[in-house]
Image: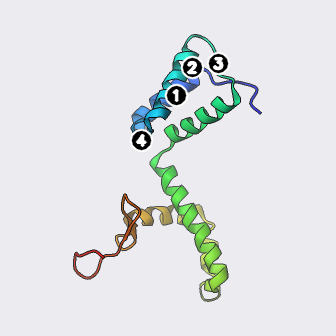
Amino acid sequence: MLTKGLTYKELFTSFKKGLRNGNWRKLRFLDKTLYRAAIGYAKRGRSIVNGMLVEKLLGLIERLKETKGMRIFKRGFEKAVELLEKGEENGMFVWAPRLRYWLKEPDYIFWLGTNLFLNPYASKSLYGKIFRIRKGLSRE
């Protein structure tokens, strides 16, 4: 349980960071409104101590401070966990034993995350559909 609330300084520094890195524009309208209201409340010298509100604001602060590297690493980590689970089931580590160690190295996890962005053969569109490119430029 949080004993200390969120202050104006904490909220405003996260707001500025989110503006600089472009994450502010990615937030939904109601999230932005809640954040602005919290800044306005905290600006009068008060701190926000309501547990549910602090939890919601901490989630927004996390999203505002997120960087491209963090998003890449998160995607790579998800892919590494998926490969570890599938590798155990399918016996992939029998013929590729070093892969188990690679999937635990931070550099390889980061590479997996960047590869998900750069691989044109299995990239997801905005709508979640998977496009596979054939020999020509046509898509399925």
Decide which of tag 2 and tag 3 comes sooner along the chain. 2
Q: Quadrant of residue 27?
A: top left
Left or right side of 50 for 113: left
Q: Which mark is residue 8?
A: 2
Front-most of residues 92 and 98: 92
Left or right side of 23 for 131: left
Q: Quadrant of residue 140?
A: bottom left
Decide which of tag 3 and tag 1 comes sooner along the chain. 1
Secondary structure of the residue carrying tag 4 is: helix
How are the colours assigned in the image? rainbow
Q: Is residue 1 above or below residue 105?
A: above
Residue 63 visible in this rendered orientation of the protein: yes
**Residue in the picture at 48% in, 56% down:** 72
Residue named by callout 1: 34
Q: Is residue 45 above or below residue 25?
A: above
Q: CA distance from mark 4 to mark 2?
A: 22 Å
Image quarter (top left, top right, bottom left or bottom right) of the N terminus:
top right
**Residue in the picture at 76% in, 26% down:** 3
Looking at the rendered structure, the kind of residue marked 2 is Tyr
Decide which of tag 2 and tag 1 comes sooner along the chain. 2
Decide which of tag 4 and tag 1 comes sooner along the chain. 4
Secondary structure of the residue carrying tag 1 is: helix
Q: Nearer the viewer, mark 4 or mark 1?
A: 1
Q: Nearer the viewer, mark 2 or mark 1?
A: 1
Residue 135: x and y, percent? 25, 82
Crowding near the residue tagged with mark 2, few <14, some 14–19, many ≥20 C-alpha atoms within 10 Å: many
User: Is mark 2 in CB contact (under 8 Å) with mark 3?
Assistant: yes
Crowding near the residue tagged with mark 1, few <14, some 14–19, many ≥20 C-alpha atoms within 10 Å: some
